[in-house]
Amino acid sequence: MTIKATPVTAEAFAPFGELLATREKASKMINAGRCERHHALATVERGGGEAIISIFRSEPVSLPYDCALLERHPLGSQAFVPLGSQPWLSVVAHDEGGKPGAPIAFLIPAGMGVNLRAGVWHGVLTPLDQPADFLVVDREGDGVNLEEVAIAPVTITA
Protein backbone atom coordinates (compact mmCIF):
# COMPACT_ATOMS: atom_id res chain seq x y z
CA MET A 1 0.00 0.00 0.00
CA THR A 2 1.24 3.50 -0.83
CA ILE A 3 -0.17 6.73 0.57
CA LYS A 4 0.73 10.34 -0.06
CA ALA A 5 1.62 12.62 2.84
CA THR A 6 -0.47 15.77 2.66
CA PRO A 7 0.10 19.18 4.21
CA VAL A 8 -1.58 19.31 7.59
CA THR A 9 -4.58 21.50 8.37
CA ALA A 10 -6.38 21.91 11.69
CA GLU A 11 -9.59 20.53 10.16
CA ALA A 12 -7.96 17.40 8.69
CA PHE A 13 -6.04 16.68 11.91
CA ALA A 14 -8.99 17.35 14.28
CA PRO A 15 -10.10 13.69 14.61
CA PHE A 16 -6.66 12.86 16.04
CA GLY A 17 -5.85 15.94 18.15
CA GLU A 18 -4.76 19.56 17.94
CA LEU A 19 -2.07 21.44 16.05
CA LEU A 20 0.33 23.34 18.29
CA ALA A 21 1.09 26.65 16.60
CA THR A 22 0.32 30.29 17.17
CA ARG A 23 -3.12 31.50 16.21
CA GLU A 24 -3.76 34.35 13.81
CA LYS A 25 -4.50 36.53 16.85
CA ALA A 26 -3.06 36.01 20.32
CA SER A 27 -5.46 35.16 23.15
CA LYS A 28 -4.06 38.10 25.12
CA MET A 29 -0.98 40.19 25.63
CA ILE A 30 1.10 39.64 28.78
CA ASN A 31 4.40 40.79 30.26
CA ALA A 32 3.55 44.49 30.05
CA GLY A 33 2.42 44.06 26.44
CA ARG A 34 5.68 42.49 25.22
CA CYS A 35 4.50 38.88 24.87
CA GLU A 36 1.65 37.27 22.95
CA ARG A 37 -0.05 34.44 24.84
CA HIS A 38 -1.67 31.84 22.57
CA HIS A 39 -3.54 30.24 25.44
CA ALA A 40 -4.70 26.62 25.89
CA LEU A 41 -3.80 25.28 22.44
CA ALA A 42 -4.46 21.72 23.65
CA THR A 43 -5.44 19.76 26.73
CA VAL A 44 -3.11 17.28 28.44
CA GLU A 45 -5.11 14.12 29.04
CA ARG A 46 -3.60 12.42 32.09
CA GLY A 47 -5.93 9.49 32.85
CA GLY A 48 -5.07 9.64 36.56
CA GLY A 49 -1.33 10.00 36.01
CA GLU A 50 1.00 12.99 36.02
CA ALA A 51 1.85 15.22 33.07
CA ILE A 52 5.57 15.01 32.32
CA ILE A 53 7.87 16.90 29.94
CA SER A 54 10.66 15.08 28.07
CA ILE A 55 12.96 15.63 25.10
CA PHE A 56 13.05 12.90 22.46
CA ARG A 57 15.92 12.74 19.96
CA SER A 58 14.96 10.83 16.81
CA GLU A 59 16.81 9.55 13.79
CA PRO A 60 15.45 10.84 10.48
CA VAL A 61 13.73 9.17 7.57
CA SER A 62 13.53 10.22 3.94
CA LEU A 63 10.54 9.89 1.65
CA PRO A 64 9.50 7.46 0.40
CA TYR A 65 9.30 5.91 3.89
CA ASP A 66 7.91 2.51 4.86
CA CYS A 67 5.80 2.72 8.02
CA ALA A 68 5.46 -0.71 9.66
CA LEU A 69 4.65 0.10 13.31
CA LEU A 70 1.80 2.01 14.92
CA GLU A 71 1.28 2.65 18.61
CA ARG A 72 -1.19 4.37 20.92
CA HIS A 73 -1.38 5.58 24.49
CA PRO A 74 -4.87 4.77 25.82
CA LEU A 75 -4.49 6.60 29.14
CA GLY A 76 -3.07 9.95 28.09
CA SER A 77 -2.44 12.42 25.31
CA GLN A 78 1.00 12.92 23.79
CA ALA A 79 2.24 16.26 22.42
CA PHE A 80 5.27 16.65 20.14
CA VAL A 81 6.85 20.07 19.58
CA PRO A 82 9.94 20.20 17.35
CA LEU A 83 12.90 22.09 18.78
CA GLY A 84 14.52 22.54 15.36
CA SER A 85 13.55 24.20 12.12
CA GLN A 86 12.78 21.23 9.89
CA PRO A 87 9.45 19.82 8.70
CA TRP A 88 8.45 16.38 9.94
CA LEU A 89 5.92 13.62 9.33
CA SER A 90 2.96 12.58 11.50
CA VAL A 91 1.32 9.26 10.68
CA VAL A 92 -2.05 8.59 12.35
CA ALA A 93 -4.91 6.13 11.98
CA HIS A 94 -8.49 5.84 13.16
CA ASP A 95 -9.29 3.07 15.63
CA GLU A 96 -11.21 0.17 14.13
CA GLY A 97 -12.36 -2.18 16.87
CA GLY A 98 -9.18 -1.88 18.93
CA LYS A 99 -6.85 -2.08 15.93
CA PRO A 100 -5.49 0.70 13.71
CA GLY A 101 -7.30 1.48 10.48
CA ALA A 102 -5.61 2.70 7.29
CA PRO A 103 -2.75 5.11 8.06
CA ILE A 104 -2.96 8.77 7.09
CA ALA A 105 0.25 10.81 6.72
CA PHE A 106 0.57 14.54 7.32
CA LEU A 107 3.52 16.79 6.51
CA ILE A 108 3.98 19.04 9.53
CA PRO A 109 5.75 22.33 8.80
CA ALA A 110 8.80 23.50 10.73
CA GLY A 111 7.91 25.05 14.06
CA MET A 112 4.51 23.34 14.40
CA GLY A 113 3.72 20.65 16.94
CA VAL A 114 0.81 18.26 17.42
CA ASN A 115 -1.10 16.98 20.43
CA LEU A 116 -2.41 13.45 19.90
CA ARG A 117 -5.48 12.59 21.96
CA ALA A 118 -5.46 9.58 24.27
CA GLY A 119 -5.99 6.38 22.29
CA VAL A 120 -5.02 7.75 18.85
CA TRP A 121 -3.00 5.29 16.76
CA HIS A 122 0.17 6.92 15.42
CA GLY A 123 3.50 6.12 13.85
CA VAL A 124 6.80 6.59 15.60
CA LEU A 125 8.42 10.02 15.75
CA THR A 126 9.50 10.81 12.19
CA PRO A 127 11.72 13.82 11.45
CA LEU A 128 12.57 14.21 7.78
CA ASP A 129 16.12 14.07 6.40
CA GLN A 130 18.07 14.94 9.59
CA PRO A 131 17.98 13.98 13.28
CA ALA A 132 15.72 16.16 15.41
CA ASP A 133 14.86 16.89 19.03
CA PHE A 134 11.24 17.21 20.17
CA LEU A 135 9.79 18.51 23.40
CA VAL A 136 7.23 15.88 24.46
CA VAL A 137 4.42 16.32 26.97
CA ASP A 138 2.72 13.09 27.96
CA ARG A 139 1.52 10.96 30.87
CA GLU A 140 3.37 8.89 33.42
CA GLY A 141 1.66 6.77 36.04
CA ASP A 142 0.07 3.45 36.85
CA GLY A 143 -1.59 1.37 34.16
CA VAL A 144 -0.60 0.15 30.71
CA ASN A 145 -0.29 3.23 28.50
CA LEU A 146 1.45 1.81 25.44
CA GLU A 147 0.09 -0.53 22.77
CA GLU A 148 2.21 -1.31 19.70
CA VAL A 149 1.03 -3.06 16.54
CA ALA A 150 3.18 -4.20 13.62
CA ILE A 151 1.35 -3.49 10.35
CA ALA A 152 1.95 -4.45 6.74
CA PRO A 153 4.40 -1.78 5.57
CA VAL A 154 2.75 1.31 4.09
CA THR A 155 4.95 3.36 1.77
CA ILE A 156 4.56 7.10 2.33
CA THR A 157 5.49 9.51 -0.47
CA ALA A 158 5.56 13.30 -0.77
Image: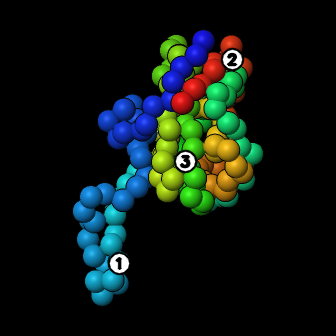
Q: Residue furthest right?
A: 59
The amino acid marked with disc number 1 is Cys
The crowding category of the residue bearing disc 3, from other C-alpha atoms within 10 Å (few below 14, some 14 to 19, many at least 20), is some
Relative image position of residue 71 (x, y in whole percent)? 64, 30
Q: Secondary structure at mark 2?
A: strand
Q: Secondary structure at mark 1?
A: strand
Circles 2 and 1 in contact, beta carbons < 8 Å: no
The crowding category of the residue bearing disc 2, from other C-alpha atoms within 10 Å (few below 14, some 14 to 19, many at least 20), is few
Most foreground residue, 33 or 96? 33
Tally of numbered tags: 3
Q: Quadrant of the N terminus?
A: top right
Most foreground residue, 153 or 145? 153
Most foreground residue, 135 or 120? 135
The amino acid marked with disc number 2 is Pro
Could you tell whether 67 is left or right of 90 in the image?
right
Residue on which the image places disc 2: 153
Q: Residue at the spot x=34%, y=69% of the render?
A: 37
Relative image position of residue 6 (x, y in whole percent)? 45, 31
- Up/down of 71 relative to 56, above or below: above
Q: Nearer the viewer, mark 2 or mark 1?
A: 2
Residue on which the image places disc 1: 35
Residue on which the image places disc 3: 87
- Marks 2 and 3, how far apart at CA: 22 Å
Q: Nearer the viewer, mark 2 or mark 3?
A: 3
Relative image position of residue 19 (x, y in whole percent)? 41, 47
